[in-house]
């Protein structure tokens, strides 16, 4: 009967729970789901990680390739994220070109990386205007149950922390490069930006929404923090949030980021 009521009257079903300050999955409004991080998931990648936020599962593989820097930033390399939402992760998607949701997710991840300055792109340059590393970060969602960006950022940052690049010697006179695969060095990560998603429903805000909660919500807010400092805010939907609500969201994001950083560090130690 409960499942039938949920299907026929999803909004009323959810509102009945919120009236008692609880959600259908048993969580309180300010409680997030368990988080799992596993490193070294892809042996053929230069760095990889799998992250789970509740049921939402994202695997990230990073491949490093040598390329020529852009003329306008001749002393920098590249970090290019790409989020994929295959039919495997949700019945909402079909085979074919990237969906709008996948493109939006890719842009949000790229914006968080840019705003946080978590990686100094100059360290990826081997010789200005001639040779640099390009890091392709493929983020594939295996199961989508809300808070996609959160899972993507955890998987991406964990994968970046596990990346090692081979030493490269370059002779500009001969335009010759030598790659020493036996001498590998880790990336220098400046900080770890962590995002947290919030959903607004009937002027109430819930943290780490499931896909059902996202579908019922009138607005979504994604907040990213680095080293307990705000670095990115994105809001979609028409419902506004008060200044006090936003402040509380930032505070909750900061607390959650500390926990996630500890989970990533623990995973690195077991690698």
Image (tube, rainbow, N blue to C red):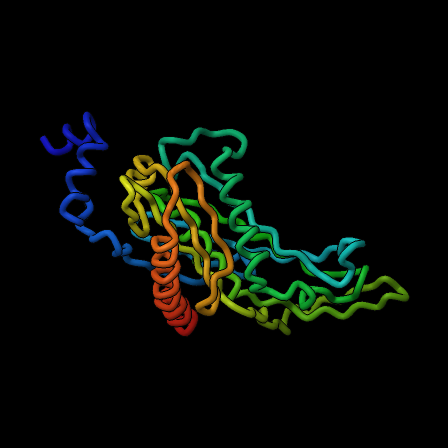
Residue 86, percent from left and from top: 45, 37
Kindly give the residue lying farthest to the top in the view shown: 8
Kindly give the residue lying farthest to the left in the view shown: 1
As drawn, is 145 to the left or to the right of 27? right
Determine the residue positioned at 51% across, 29% down: 96
Kindly give the residue lying farthest to the front in the view shown: 243
Residue 17, percent from left and from top: 16, 42
As drawn, is 80 to the left or to the right of 261? right
* In the image, residue 107 above or below residue 64: above
Residue 11, visible in the rendered structure: yes
Q: How many marks?
A: 0
Residue 158, visible in the rendered structure: no
As drawn, is 187 to the left or to the right of 74? left
Determine the residue positioned at 35% across, 65% down: 255
Determine the residue positioned at 90% across, 66% down: 173
Question: Image quadrant for the N terminus?
Answer: top left
Kindly give the residue lying farthest to the right in the view shown: 173
Closest to the observer, 263 or 244: 244
Residue 264, percent from left and from top: 41, 67
Determine the residue positioned at 15% across, 28% down: 4
Q: Quadrant of residue 9?
A: top left
Question: Image quadrant for the C terminus?
Answer: bottom left
Residue 16, percent from left and from top: 15, 38
Closest to the observer, 267 or 17: 17
* In the image, residue 44 above or below residue 147: below
């Amino acid at each position: 009967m409960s499942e039938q009521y949920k299907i026929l009257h999803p909004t009323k079903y959810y509102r009945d729970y919120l009236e008692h300050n609880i959600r259908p999955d048993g969580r309180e409004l300010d409680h997030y789901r368990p988080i799992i991080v596993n490193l070294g998931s892809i042996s053929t990648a230069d760095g990889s990680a799998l992250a789970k936020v509740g049921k939402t599962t994202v695997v990230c593989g990073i491949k490093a390739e040598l390329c020529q820097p852009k003329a306008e930033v001749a002393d920098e390399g590249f970090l290019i994220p790409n989020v994929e939402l295959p039919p495997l992760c949700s019945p909402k998607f079909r085979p074919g070109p990237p969906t709008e949701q996948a493109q939006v997710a890719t842009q949000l991840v790229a914006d968080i990386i840019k705003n946080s300055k978590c990686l100094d792109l100059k360290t990826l340059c081997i010789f200005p205007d001639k040779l640099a590393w390009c890091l392709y970060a493929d983020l594939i969602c295996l199961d989508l149950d809300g808070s996609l960006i959160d899972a993507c950022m955890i998987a991406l940052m964990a994968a970046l922390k596990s990346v090692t690049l081979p030493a490269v010697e370059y002779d500009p006179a001969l335009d010759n490069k030598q790659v020493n695969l036996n001498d590998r060095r880790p990336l220098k990560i400046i900080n770890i930006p962590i995002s947290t998603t919030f959903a607004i429903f009937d002027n109430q805000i819930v943290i780490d929404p499931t896909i059902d909660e996202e579908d019922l919500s009138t607005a979504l807010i994604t907040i990213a923090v680095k080293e307990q400092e705000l670095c990115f805010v994105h809001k979609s939907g028409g419902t506004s949030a008060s200044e006090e609500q936003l402040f509380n969201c930032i505070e909750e994001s900061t607390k959650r980021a500390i926990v996630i950083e500890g989970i990533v560090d623990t995973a690195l130690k077991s690698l």
